[in-house]
Amino acid sequence: MAPSLTETVSLRDPTFKVPLKTDAGHNKENLIGYQYEKEAELKGTDKIAPASFPNYLPHYDHGKDADPSFPDLLPKDQAEVDEVTPFIGSEIKGVQLSQLSKAGKDQLALYVAQRRVSSNEADHDKSAFRDQDFASLPIQEAVDYAGYFGRHHVHQTSGAPKGFPEIHLVFRGADDRTGATFLEQRTNTITWHSDVTFEKQPPGTTFLYVLDGPSTGGDTLFGDMVQAYKRLSPEFRKRLHGLRAVHSGVEQVNASLNGGGIARRDPITSEHPIVRTHPVTGEKALYPCVVTRHIVGFKKEESDYLLKFLYDHIALSQDLQTRIRWKPGTVVVWDNRLACHSAVFDWEDGQRRHIARLTPQAEAPYETPFEG
């Protein structure tokens, strides 16, 4: 639940903590323990102007410059890689993301997007890096790091640290009823989506990192939208090509305002293809989302029917999914163009869950001609 404009959130001791970075006097400038400052986020500060949203900015994907053998990202004598499933997900230890060189960052962009062809190797549209120092970095350093991958997205309604609207906070405190509210109207809390698809330029390489969380529960699910596309019959895939859908940010803003939260701008809607193409790998992926409202040119019943089929296809394909359990120091990096995800609201013991997201925007979604 978003705080009001004047409310601050008192933080209690979490189940686990990330140690603070104490060098260079930065121990008070990371995210841990930060209060929400809604007024500053809305109006800007002496350091950061209020959020502005230009309609289009050319995007360059650094995965194009990457060495596909990943020597700087995954040194053979240092990195430990565990492929979580045959299709999606890798758990990586022995690599400190904050210390990557430019070449390493380029390889990271490719790694989380690239699709392996050998059956005994995994696709990597989502990767979990363990034992990271991201949460204890000075905030500006974390923001600068993610900014290498694209223009920062500023969320239209979410909480953020004072003066840093680029950071999207996912917070659930002891009195939060998100899970219970879901279950008053639904039988589960799962909502598959890609982030902020109502934007003209939704995100690509995305970073999610834990500040603290419950001892168990609160996992995040990820689904492989390239494989979901490939599972469809050639004739069905052919029919999807050329279709466009409207994605809306209106409902999110209304929900925030009705709950006492904020809106940093007037909400927008955008049209995107149902099937999008990745600019580096050339792979095609399904791109429906929870904020997809209707398919352009279809009657309501036709649109609802097709979108329901696609949503059900994604939800039921557990053989295209993986599940990340949050541990201290975990950073999940994924490509929002190729993978969808869902939070899991399955703990009710009052423990806090506090996660931060850095969300660089990518190119405007596009599709390339159908190939059978």
Image (spheres, rainbow, N blue to C red):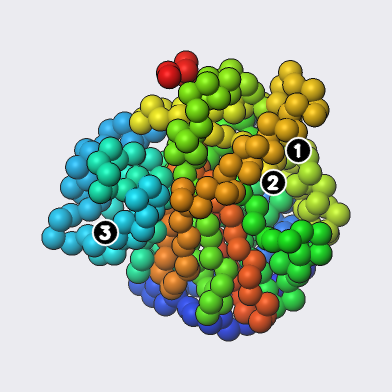
Q: Compared to 108, does 232 lie above or below?
A: above
Quarter where residue 280 is shown? top left
**Mark drawn on residue 267:** 1
Which residue in the protein does label 3 denote?
81
The secondary element bearing badge 1 is classed as loop
Closer to the chain start, of discs 2 and 3, is 3
The secondary element bearing badge 3 is classed as strand
Closer to the chain start, of discs 3 and 1, is 3
Closer to the chain start, of discs 1 and 2, is 2
Badges 1 and 2: C-beta atoms under 8 Å apart?
yes
Label 1 vs label 2: CA separation? 8 Å
* Residue toward you, 112 or 180: 180
Quarter where residue 266 is shown? top right
Label 2 vs label 3: CA separation? 36 Å
Which residue in the protein does label 2 denote?
156
Residue drawn at x 75%, y 33% is 304
The three-letter amino acid code for the residue at tag 3 is Val
The quarter of the image holding the N terminus is: bottom right
The three-letter amino acid code for the residue at tag 2 is Gln
Instruction: Point out the frontmost of discs 3 and 1.
Output: 3
Label 3 vs label 1: CA separation? 41 Å
Residue drawn at x 34%, y 39% is 114
* Residue toward you, 181 or 302: 302
Q: Compared to 246, does 258 lie above or below?
A: below
